[in-house]
């Protein structure tokens, strides 16, 4: 698809690292599937991936995680 940020590049399938901060918690997800702009590097996630990221961050916060780096797991 056409990039929504620079409106110049085309996006292609890839995987990116996504850091999330919430309260005092920092969690970094690796290998998150995304459409990445070949021009500006902006990454776009589909709704299912975004929802899963937020849910996993929520669970980590509840578990008392303060900082963590984990591989992204697609929710079943
Ligand atoms: Zn772009």
Image (cartoon, helix red, strand yellow):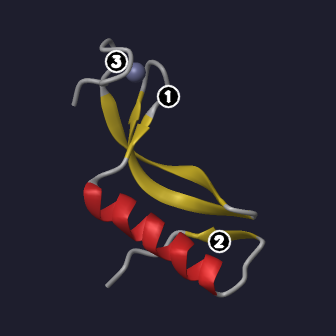
Q: Nearer the viewer, mark 2 or mark 3?
A: 2
Query: Residue 29 falls in which quadrant of the image?
Result: bottom right
Residues at circles 2 and 1 in contact by the CB criterion of under 8 Å:
no
Q: Residues within 10 Å of mark 2 (few under 14, many from 20)?
A: few
Q: Quick one: 69 or 39, which is closer to the camera?
A: 69
User: Most extreme residue toward the left, as rendered?
Assistant: 1
Other-residue count near label 3 (Cα within 10 Å), few / some / many at <14 / 14–19 / ≥20 = some
At mark 2, the secondary structure is strand
Residue 13, compared with residue 40, is above or below; it is: below
- Mark 1 and mark 3: span between their CA atoms? 9 Å
Q: Is mark 2 within 8 Å of ligand 1?
A: no
The residue sitting at 75% across, 63% down in the picture is 24
Q: Which SS class for mark 1?
A: loop
Farthest front residue in view:
23
First in residue order: circle 2 vs circle 3 = 3
Q: From the image, tell me which residue sits under label 2.
A: 70
Q: Residue 30: x and y, percent?
A: 59, 60
Q: Position of residue 36 (x, y in %)?
A: 41, 36
Q: How crowded is the residue under tag 1: few (<14 C-alpha within 10 Å), some, or many (20+)? A: some
Cα separation between marks 2 and 1: 22 Å
Confirm if mark 1 falls within 8 A of ligand 1.
yes
Confirm or deny contact between disc 1 and disc 3 (CB under 8 A).
no
Expressed as whole percent of the image width and height from the top left, the position of residue 58 reads: 53, 75
Find out if the beta carbon at label 3 lies less than 8 Å from the nearest ligand 1 atom: yes
Identify the residue at image location x=29%, y=53%. 46
Q: Specify the quadrant that holds the C terminus.
A: bottom left
Q: Which residue is mark 1?
A: 41
Ligand 1's quadrant:
top left
Residue 1 horizontal side relative to residue 30, left or right: left
The mark nearer the N terminus, 1 or 3, is: 3
Find disc 3 in the rendering and name its residue.
Answer: 9
């Amino acid at each position: 698809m056409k990039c929504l940020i620079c409106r110049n590049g085309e996006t292609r399938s890839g995987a990116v690292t996504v850091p999330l901060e919430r309260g005092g918690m920092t969690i970094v997800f690796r290998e998150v599937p995304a459409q990445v702009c070949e021009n500006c590097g902006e990454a776009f996630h589909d709704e299912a991936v975004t929802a899963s990221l937020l849910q996993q961050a929520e669970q980590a916060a509840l578990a008392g995680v303060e900082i963590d780096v984990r591989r992204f797991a697609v929710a079943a």
